[in-house]
Amino acid sequence: MRFSPAAVAMAFVLATVSSSVESQKPDDQIDPRSVALVTRADAARAAGQLEQAQDMLETALAIDPRNRGAYIAMGRVATAQTLPGKAVRFYREALAIDPNDVSALSGQGVAMVERGAVERAKDNLAKVRTLCKAECPQAATLAAAIAKGPPPAVVTAQNNTVVPPKDKADEKAKP
């Protein structure tokens, strides 16, 4: 009787851990139809057919939502559409599946630079360099984006954004 609460808790922990491990598929267990759609979508993106590529990638994710490559490709499409916020979100989804994916870290870093979050992009660059151990193209791409800096429109917007001082009347109105 003394050990029954501990045994129940241990059984719950083991059941939870084993079920979460089973839900993560390695890349070789991704549905082949989903992988084929990602390949076709990459070709469409390279040809400049961004809407068609996006549609194929959404279908690929509907077939197999654990397809990390589809999220990375969606991030690339969003970057090509100059939607860096959307790109960051797709790269975050890929990193939720595999936090050590160098392509996702690099792509997310480039998108962060486009949004003006250079410091966060530098954090991603440090992670990429740690994972690569030697110089790799993803690290070079991200380093070049950081060196180039955010687009002028983002810099202008950041410089012109002024936080108004707190009004003393507002402070008194709040209880």
Image: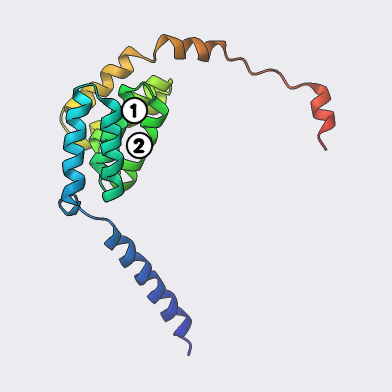
- Specify whether 128 is left or right of 113: left
Residue identified by numbered label 2? 90
Q: Secondary structure at mark 2?
A: helix
Of the image marks 2 and 1, the number of the one nearer the N terminus: 1
Compared to residue 28, the image places residue 133 above or below, namely above
How many numbered marks does the figure carry?
Answer: 2
Please name whichever residue, 75 or 96, is drawn nearer the observer in this view of the structure.
75
Determine whether the residue tagged by mark 1 lies in a helix, strand or loop: helix
Q: Quadrant of residue 14?
A: bottom left
| 32 on left or right of 9 | left
Camera-nearest residue between 29 and 112: 29
Between 135 and 65, the residue placed more toward the observer is: 65
Q: Amino acid at mark 2?
A: Phe
Q: Residue at x 43, y 79 (%)?
A: 8
Residue 64, can we see it?
Answer: no
Q: Quadrant of the C terminus?
A: top right
Image position, residue 169 (x, y; %): 83, 24
Q: How is the image coloured?
A: rainbow
Position of residue 39 relative to residue 167, above or below, is below
Query: Which x, y percent locates residue 124?
Result: 33, 31
Q: CA distance from mark 2 to mark 1?
A: 9 Å
Mark 1 sits on what residue?
Answer: 78
> In percent of the image, x 45 and y 14: which residue is there?
154
